[in-house]
Structure formats: structure tokens, C-alpha cells
Amino acid sequence: MSSSTLDAAALERLVAAAVAAPSLHNTQPWRFRLDTDTRTVCIHAAPDRALRHTDPVGRAVHLSVGCAVLNLRVAAAHFGWEPVTRLLPCPDRPALLATVRLAESVRDAPSTGLYEAVWRRHSSRFPFSGRPLPSDLLTELTEAAHLEGATLRFPRHNDTDRVLRPTREAELRNRADVDRAAESRRLVSGPHSRSLGLPSAALGPQDARDRMPMRDFGAHRHQEVLPARTFETRPTLALLSTAHDRRTDWLRAGQALERVLLLATLGGVRASLLHQAMEWPDLRGALDDLPVDGPRVHTQMVIRFGYGPEGPASPRRPVEEAMEGDG
């Protein structure tokens, strides 16, 4: 990619990297528009992709867009641009969540490897081996979150159940909530949808011993739909949090989340997102004091890490469907 021009093929590659980001239920709630005069990519929330019952305040949309912004930054740097990012740049345009201007950059910048990880990263909802992650990798993941203005905490083993308890409670509530359950079921991809939602093969099994509260997207827990398997006894969990809980914090948390996930991918580590408790304010708040000897923060995501099967990837919409006309 030239550092002075941005042709259609280059733009497509940048947006393809952004679209590879994770999103709640693979809703891909973003729209991209290029301002050709300033070489700026504008990222808007896509209201038609929002989950009205599961994500009523749009927090998950902001996290998802934050993940896409990080991928866009990584791709821009890989191709020789310096990405200049602004969050919520126009107060009178609330759907415009971020802009990334492609400024000139020094050629031959050292590679971080994150660009390659963009294409390899995806969630695995299958059982992991239980083998612990190396301490130096945990440190690197913590530093990665810090780079984006967030905190990554690894609860002690005796706090693991305190993390999983709100997730279990949220999963029970989600199955009992008619509207949320229906919203979840609609996003299990069938033959009619090849680019949104989650393919049934990617849903993963239920935990035969109910140790790990994996999401039941069909809200029925029928073993013929989500077969039971035994999950790890001591899961490696991390809490991603921010000091405040504003829209900008949600966007920063999304960027931190994706940087952490890409770095884990480079280390051969799988990850899945335990989002259930994040969908209920009281249950999300119950995680804010962990660990008990630290400052109170605002938990934005529970991440499960481990070594195990890759699992199938969820589909992505074609770039042209995520793009709007030139600005």
C-alpha cells in the first residue's frame, strides 16, 4: 500500500480487517465510510444490528466497534500508515463512534505480528485443557490492556467461583427472559444467513458438570442441540475493566479487548467471551470489586483463556455490505 494514495483495494483490506473483529452474537454492528479529502475512515454504529433486549444501552455495540477500531489501526500500521484515532468526535452525531485518519508514516516500521493474528483470531467455545498460561504471557496480556487505557485482572483461583457465579445467574435469567431468548435464537445462523449470527457448529457444548456457564443460544439446553462435555476444572479467567463507565470507556475497552485477544492468538492461546453477566447491571456490578484488595473499577468483559481446539469461525459480511458511500 502506498503511503500517499488510498485506492479501493487498500481500503477494502483495511475494512476487511476491521470487520474481522468480534461482536456480541456476531451482529457486526458497524458501518464504515471513507472521507476521501482527509483520508479518514469513519466508523458508525449500525442501529439495525443492535440487540434491543440484550444490549439496551448499546454498551456492547461500543465494545464491538472498539474492537473493529483496533483492527483497523493494526492494519493501517501494517501497510505503512500512522492511524490517528478520535473517539466520539462529533457530539451532535452520536452514531459516529470513531474516526481513524490515515496519516503519513515512516516506512519499514517493525512488525508486531498483530496483523497476521487479525485473520486467525476467533472465539472457541469448546473445552480447554486446563494447562495454565505462562506467567510471562499473563504479564504481556495485562500490559496490552494497559496500552489501551484498560485494566486486565486475573482473579486468584479461590475467586474463580465468585466470577462465575454472576455468569451462571445471568445465563439463567437470559433463558427465562422471553425477549432475550428469542433475540438470541434469531442469531443462530441457519441456511438463510451466511454472514451474520453464529453457525450452530460454533456454539460449542454445554458443560456436563455445570462448572463453566457457556451460553445456551437456543435457551433450551437440549443436549441434542448443545451436547454436554466436561470443561476445565480450573479455568483461566480475566476481568477487563476501566476506571470509568462512559461511552468513551466502552470504546477504549473494546480496543483493549481486541489487543489482548490478538496477542493471545499469537501465543497460541484460545479465548471465549463470557458476556452474560455484562448484560445485567447488578451482576456486572458484582464483579467490580474483584479482587477485593484492589480499587473499585467498572468491569467490561469476562474472558476465558486456555489451550484447546480452535473451533469453527463465525462468518463475516462482505466488505461492500459494511461500507457506505464516500464522505
Image (cartoon, helix red, strand yellow):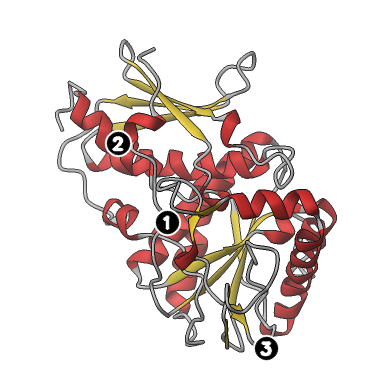
Disc 2 to disc 1, C-alpha distance: 19 Å
Residue located at (77% from left, 75% from top): 162
Q: Which residue is mark 2?
A: 14
Q: Is residue 298 visible?
A: no
Label 3 close to label 1 by CB (< 8 Å)? no
Which amino acid lies under the numbered mark 1 shown in the image of this protein?
A: Ser
Instruction: Using residue 315 as the reference point, say whether residue 150 is left or right of it.
Output: right
Q: Is residue 108 visible?
A: yes
Between circles 2 and 3, the one closer to the viewer is: 3
Q: Quadrant of residue 236?
A: bottom right
Disc 2 to disc 3, C-alpha distance: 43 Å
Residue located at (57% from left, 36% from top): 49
Badge 3 marks a residue whose secondary structure is: loop
Which amino acid lies under the numbered mark 2 shown in the image of this protein?
A: Leu
* Sequence order check, earlier mark of 2 and 1: 2
Q: Quadrant of residue 245?
A: top right
Rendered location of residue 134, percent (x, y): 44, 80
Residue located at (28% from left, 54% from top): 112
* Sequence order check, earlier mark of 3 and 1: 3
Q: Which residue is mark 1?
A: 314
Rendered location of residue 262, percent (x, y): 39, 58
